[in-house]
C-alpha cells in the first residue's frame, strides 16, 4: 500500500496517532512526497482539525496546486477561522492559481461566518467576471453570505437568479429573512416553497417556527408543527427547540412543557427556550425551578440560559437565588461580559441592591449601552434621582449614545420628579434621531406628560403614535384617571376596545380608578364584574382596594366593609386604609376603629392608622380615646413622616420638607407662607385644631 493510500485511510479512521506515525515514517525513510501525497497529508490534518500542521505541510511543499490551497481554505472555514481562511485565499491568488467552485464555496462560507460583507462582494465580483457557469453550490453560498451579512436584498437578487432553486437555496434565503427579523417575509417564502413542491427539511422548519414564535402567531405556528409531523421532518435539536420556543413565547406554557418532556434527550437550547418562556410570561419561580433541574442534569448552562434565569430572579425579586446564580457563574469560569454582566446588574438594580449593582457595573471589562440602561433604570425605579442624573452625565461624557430604552428611563425620571421642562428637552432629543415613532419611547412620553399633568400634550403624543400597544392605552387611561378626569378615561377605554386591543389587569385598574375619582359606583361595579366574567381576569388586591375606595368615598362605608368580608383573598393594609379613609371623611367611628385595628394587626408601627383613628375620635369629640391613641404613639416613639413636595423652576427642582430650614431661600418662603396664612384666615377659613400635628 502506498503512503497516499495509508494517509487517506488514516484520515478516514480519525486516528490521529496512526496518521502521525505514517507521516513520521515518511520523513524517517527519506521519502520525498509528490504533490498528490502532500495533499493527502494536508487533508488528513484538516480532518484532525490540526490546522497548524496542515499549514506547515503546505508551506514546505516544493510544488503546490489548487487542491492544496482549497483544502486549507476549507479547513479554516469549517473551523470558524474566517480571517485565516481569507488570508489563505489571498495567498492562493498571489500564487497564481484561479479558484474553482470548491474554493469559492469555502471562502464564501468563511465570509458568511465572520460577516465579511465587503470581501464577499469582492469575491462575487470576481466570480461574475471570470466564471461562465455557476453550479448550485456557489449560488447557494452567495445567498448565504449576503443573508448572514444582513444584505437581504442582495441575497434575494441572487436567489431570484437561480433557475431551479433547490432545498438548500430555499433554506438559505428563508433563514436569512428570519435572522434579519423579516418574519412575515420568511413565512411568505415558506408558502412559496410549499407551492413550488419543495419538501422542507429541519432547517426550513426551524426558521419558520422561529418566525412564528417571534410574531407570536400561534395559529400559523401550529400549522407548521403539523407540517413537521406529517412530512416526517427529522426532529433534531433545532426543530425541537423551535417547537418548544413557539409555544413558550405564545404563552402556551403547558404545551411547551409537554413537548419538552416528550423529547428523549432535550438539548441545552430546548432547556433555554422553556426557561426563557417561563420568564417572559411572568412565571419566574417556575423558571428558577426548571433551572434547578437543568443544573442537576449532565448539561452545563451557557450564558443564554444564565441570562434568562437571572431575568426570572429579577422579575420575581428572588434575590437569594439571584446571588446563588451570581456565585455559580463566577465558579463556572464565566467572565462578566456584557451579556451575563448586564443581567446581573439588572437583577440587583430591580431588587434595590444598588451598591451591588454598581459594583458589578464597574467590575465589567466592557460595558455597553444596556449596562448603563440597567443601572440608570434601577436608580430611577428606587427614587435615587440624584445618582441617576449623575450616571446619565457620566454615560454621555464617556461617549455612549443613548438608546430608546435610555430615553424611556429619562422620561420616567422626569415624570416621577415631575420635571416638565426636562421632559420637553428630552422629547426634542428623541425627535432628532427619529425615536419618537417607537412605541416604547412613545408610551414613555405619554406617561411623562400625564404624570406632569400635561394631559393635552400626552394626548397629542398618543394620537401621533403609528402603533399603539397595550402599554400606550393603559398609560393614557391611567393618566386621565389619576388626574380625576374619569369621563375621558372611560371614553379612552371604549376606544381601546373598538380598536381591537385586549385589556389586561392594569387597564381595569385604571378604569376602576377613574370610577373612584368621579364617584361612578354602578359603572365601577359593572366594569369589575366584566373584568371577571367577560375577560377572565382574576382580580388582584389592587382591584379590590379600588372597589373598597369606590364605596367608601361616596359614603357607603358599611357596604365597603361587607365587600371586604366577602373578598376571596386576605385583605392587606391598603384595603383597610381605603376603608379607614372613608370612615374619616364620613365620620363612622365603629367601622373606622375596626379598620384601624386590622391595619395595626398587620403592621403595629403604621403611623397613618393612628393618625386617622385619632382624627375620627377628634371629629366625634371622643377626647379620652383620642388622648389614648396619642399616648400609645408617644410610648412607641411613632411620628408621622414629614411631608415633602417639590417644584421645578427654571430647570431646577426645589424640594420642600415640613419643618426644614435648610433651603437657601427659606426667609422669603416663610414670609410668603405667613402672608398666605393671613389671607386664608381673613377669608374665613377655620383650622381643625384637633388634628395631630405633622411631627406627632
Image: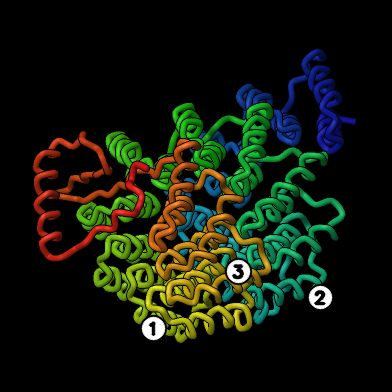
Mark 2 neighbour class, 10 Å CA radius: few under 14, some 14 to 19, many 20 or more:
few
Q: Quadrant of residue 682?
A: bottom left
Please say which color scheme the image uses: rainbow
Q: Residues within 10 Å of mark 3 (few under 14, many from 20)?
A: many
Q: Secondary structure at mark 2?
A: helix
Q: Which residue is mark 1?
A: 491
Image quadrant where residue 322 sits:
top right
Q: Residue at x 70, y 47 (%)?
A: 288
Question: Would you place residue 646 above or below residue 505 in this image?
Answer: above
Q: Residues within 10 Å of mark 1 (few under 14, many from 20)?
A: few
Q: Secondary structure at mark 1?
A: helix
Give the position of the C terminus as an image quadrant. top left
Q: Secondary structure at mark 3?
A: helix
Disc assigned to residue 230: 2
Estimate the x, y position of residue 687 in percent, counting from the top left.
24, 58
What residue sits right under mark 3 in the picture?
564
Cβ–Cβ under 8 Å for marks 2 and 3: no
**For the view shown, which residue lies furthest in the right direction?**
1
Q: Residue at x 68, y 31 (%)?
A: 328
**Res 242 label:** none
How far apart marks 1 and 2 lie (CA) works out to 49 Å
Relative depth, front residue between 97 and 272: 272
Spatial distance from mark 2 to mark 3, Cα to Cα? Answer: 55 Å
Amino acid at each position: 500500500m502506498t503512503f497516499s493510500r495509508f494517509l487517506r485511510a488514516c484520515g478516514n479512521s480519525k486516528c490521529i496517532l496512526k496518521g502521525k506515525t505514517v507521516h513520521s515514517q515518511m520523513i524517517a525513510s527519506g521519502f520525498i512526497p509528490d504533490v498528490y501525497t502532500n495533499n493527502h497529508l494536508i487533508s488528513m490534518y484538516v480532518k484532525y482539525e490540526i490546522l497548524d500542521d496542515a499549514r506547515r505541510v503546505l508551506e514546505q511543499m516544493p510544488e503546490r496546486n489548487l487542491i492544496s490551497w482549497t483544502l486549507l481554505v476549507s479547513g479554516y472555514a469549517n473551523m470558524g477561522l474566517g480571517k485565516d481562511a481569507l488570508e489563505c485565499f489571498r495567498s492562493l491568488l498571489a500564487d497564481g492559481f484561479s479558484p474553482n467552485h470548491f474554493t469559492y464555496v469555502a471562502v464564501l462560507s468563511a465570509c458568511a461566518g465572520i460577516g465579511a460583507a465587503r470581501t464577499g462582494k469582492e469575491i462575487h465580483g470576481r466570480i461574475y467576471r471570470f466564471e461562465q457557469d455557476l453550479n448550485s453550490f456557489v449560488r447557494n453560498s452567495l445567498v448565504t453570505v449576503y443573508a448572514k451579512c444582513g444584505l437581504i436584498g442582495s441575497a434575494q437578487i441572487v436567489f431570484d437568479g437561480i433557475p431551479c432553486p433547490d432545498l438548500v437555496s430555499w433554506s438559505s434565503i428563508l433563514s436569512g429573512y428570519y435572522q434579519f427579523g423579516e418574519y412575515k417575509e420568511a413565512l411568505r417564502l415558506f408558502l412559496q416553497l410549499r407551492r413550488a413542491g419543495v419538501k422542507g427539511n429541519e432547517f426550513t422548519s426551524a426558521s419558520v417556527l422561529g418566525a412564528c414564535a417571534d410574531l407570536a402567531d400561534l395559529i400559523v405556528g401550529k400549522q407548521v408543527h403539523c407540517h413537521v409531523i406529517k412530512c416526517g421532518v427529522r426532529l433534531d435539536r433545532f426543530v425541537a427547540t423551535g417547537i418548544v420556543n413557539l409555544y413558550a413565547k405564545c404563552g402556551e406554557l403547558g404545551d411547551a412543557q409537554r413537548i419538552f418532556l416528550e423529547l428523549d434527550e432535550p438539548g441545552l437550547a430546548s432547556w433555554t427556550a422553556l426557561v426563557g418562556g417561563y420568564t417572559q410570561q411572568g412565571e419566574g419561580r417556575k423558571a428558577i425551578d426548571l433551572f434547578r433541574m437543568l443544573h442537576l442534569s449532565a448539561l452545563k448552562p451557557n450564558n443564554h440560559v444564565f441570562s434568562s434565569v437571572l431575568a426570572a430572579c429579577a422579575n420575581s425579586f428572588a434575590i437569594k437565588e439571584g446571588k446563588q446564580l451570581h456565585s455559580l457563574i463566577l465558579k463556572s469560569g464565566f467572565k462578566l461580559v456584557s451579556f451575563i454582566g448586564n443581567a446581573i446588574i439588572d437583577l440587583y438594580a430591580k431588587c434595590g441592591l444598588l451598591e451591588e449593582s454598581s459594583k458589578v457595573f464597574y467590575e465589567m471589562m466592557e460595558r455597553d449601552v444596556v449596562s448603563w440602561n440597567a443601572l440608570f433604570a434601577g436608580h430611577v425605579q428606587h427614587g435615587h434621582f440624584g445618582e441617576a442624573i449623575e450616571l446619565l452625565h457620566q454615560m454621555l461624557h464617556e461617549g455612549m449614545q443613548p438608546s430608546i430604552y435610555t430615553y424611556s428611563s429619562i422620561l420616567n425620571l422626569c415624570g416621577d420628579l415631575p420635571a416638565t421642562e426636562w421632559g420637553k428637552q428630552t422629547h426634542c432629543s428623541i425627535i432628532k434621531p427619529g425615536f419618537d415613532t417607537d412605541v416604547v419611547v412613545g408610551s414613555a412620553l405619554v406617561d411623562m406628560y400625564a404624570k406632569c399633568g400635561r394631559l393635552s400634550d400626552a394626548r397629542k403624543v398618543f394620537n401621533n403614535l403609528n402603533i399603539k400597544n397595550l402599554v400606550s392605552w393603559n398609560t393614557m387611561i391611567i393618566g386621565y384617571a389619576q388626574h380625576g378626569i374619569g369621563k375621558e378615561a372611560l371614553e379612552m377605554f371604549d376606544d381601546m376596545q373598538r380598536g381591537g386591543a385586549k385589556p389586561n389587569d392594569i387597564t381595569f385598574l385604571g378604569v376602576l380608578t377613574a370610577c373612584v375619582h368621579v364617584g361612578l359606583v354602578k359603572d365601577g361595579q359593572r366594569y369589575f364584574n366584566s373584568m371577571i366574567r367577560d375577560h377572565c381576569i382574576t382580580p388582584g388586591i389592587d382591584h379590590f382596594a379600588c372597589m373598597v375606595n369606590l364605596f367608601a368615598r361616596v359614603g357607603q362605608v358599611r357596604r365597603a366593609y361587607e365587600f371586604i368580608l366577602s373578598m376571596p383573598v386576605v385583605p392587606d393594609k391598603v384595603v383597610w386604609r381605603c376603608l379607614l379613609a372613608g370612615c374619616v371623611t364620613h365620620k363612622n367611628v365603629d367601622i373606622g376603629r375596626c379598620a384601624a385595628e386590622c391595619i395595626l394587626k398587620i403592621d403595629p408601627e403604621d403611623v397613618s392608622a393612628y393618625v386617622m383613628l385619632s382624627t375620627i375620635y377628634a371629629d366625634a369629640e371622643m377626647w379620652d380615646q383620642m388622648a389614648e391613641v396619642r399616648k400609645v404613639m408617644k410610648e412607641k416613639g411613632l411620628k408621622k413622616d414629614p411631608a415633602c413636595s417639590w417644584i421645578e423652576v427654571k430647570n431646577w427642582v426645589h424640594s420642600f420638607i415640613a419643618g426644614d430650614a435648610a433651603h437657601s431661600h427659606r426667609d422669603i418662603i416663610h414670609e410668603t407662607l405667613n402672608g398666605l396664612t393671613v389671607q386664608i384666615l381673613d377669608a374665613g377659613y377655620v383650622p381643625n385644631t384637633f388634628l395631630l400635628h405633622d411631627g406627632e
